[in-house]
C-alpha cells in the first residue's frame, strides 16, 4: 500500500474543528490580557494605603510587563492557528515543511499548528 501523502477531507474537518476551538479560547485569553494591560479590569492603586503604594506600583509594573509578554505570545499563537486554518483549506495541512511527509495525527492533535514532524524538529536543533 502506498504511503499516505495527505489527510482525508474528513480528517481535515476534524483538525479544522480542533483549531477553531483553540482559536476561540486563544482569542478570549488574548482579550483578557489586553484588558489587564489597558487597566480596564478595574484594579488600580487609588484606594491603597500610602505605605504600600510604592510596593503596589512596583508589582503593577512587573505584572504589566509579564502580561505584555504573554499577550505577544498569545498573538503569535493566534497567527499560527490562523495559518493552520489556511493550510486546512488548501489541503496542505499536516505535511511537514522539511520532509514533505505527513506529520503524525497524534502530534497534530497535541500541537495543531505544527509544521514540522518531530524528526525534522529535532534535526533542526542540531
Image: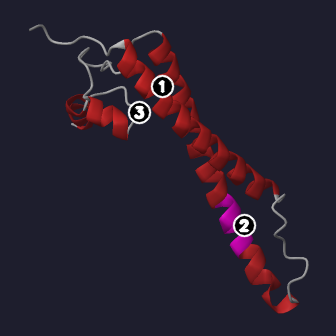
Identified at 41% across, 33% down, the residue is 112
- Could you say which quadrant of the image residue 108 lies in? top left
Identified at 64% across, 41% down, the residue is 27
* In magenta segment, residue 60: yes
Badge 3 vs badge 2, beta-carbon distance below 8 Å: no
Q: Dot 1 surroundings within 10 Å: few (below 14), some, or many (20 or more)?
A: many
Identified at 57% across, 30% down, the residue is 79
Report how far apart the C-alphas of labels 2 and 1 lie in the structure.
Answer: 39 Å
Report how far apart the C-alphas of labels 3 and 2 lie in the structure.
Answer: 34 Å
The part of the chain drawn in magenta is: 59-65
Local secondary structure at mark 2: helix
Tell me if 113 is positioned left or right of 45 in this view: left
Report how far apart the C-alphas of labels 3 and 1 lie in the structure.
Answer: 9 Å
Residue 30 in the image: state x and y as whole percent. 66, 46
Local secondary structure at mark 3: loop
Q: Earlier in the sequence, mark 2 or mark 1?
A: 1
Q: Which residue is mark 1?
A: 16
Identified at 26% across, 37% down, the residue is 125
- Could you say which quadrant of the image residue 61 lies in? bottom right
Considering every residue shown, the one lying at the far front of the view is 10
Residue 60 in the image: state x and y as whole percent. 73, 70
Relative to 94, say whether 40 is above or below.
below
Image quadrant holding the N terminus, namely top left
- Give me the disc on residue 61: 2
Amino acid at each position: 500500500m502506498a504511503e499516505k501523502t495527505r489527510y482525508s477531507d474528513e480528517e481535515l474537518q476534524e483538525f479544522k474543528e480542533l483549531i477553531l476551538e483553540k482559536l476561540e479560547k486563544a482569542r478570549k485569553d488574548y482579550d483578557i490580557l489586553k484588558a489587564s494591560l489597558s487597566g480596564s479590569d478595574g484594579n488600580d492603586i487609588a484606594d491603597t494605603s500610602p505605605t504600600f503604594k510604592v510596593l503596589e506600583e512596583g508589582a503593577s509594573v512587573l505584572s504589566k510587563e509579564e502580561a505584555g509578554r504573554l499577550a505577544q505570545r498569545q498573538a503569535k499563537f493566534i497567527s499560527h492557528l490562523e495559518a493552520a486554518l489556511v493550510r486546512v483549506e488548501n489541503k496542505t495541512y499536516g505535511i511537514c515543511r522539511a520532509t514533505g511527509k505527513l506529520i503524525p495525527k497524534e502530534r497534530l492533535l497535541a500541537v495543531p499548528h505544527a509544521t514540522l514532524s518531530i524528526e525534522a524538529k529535532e534535526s533542526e536543533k542540531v
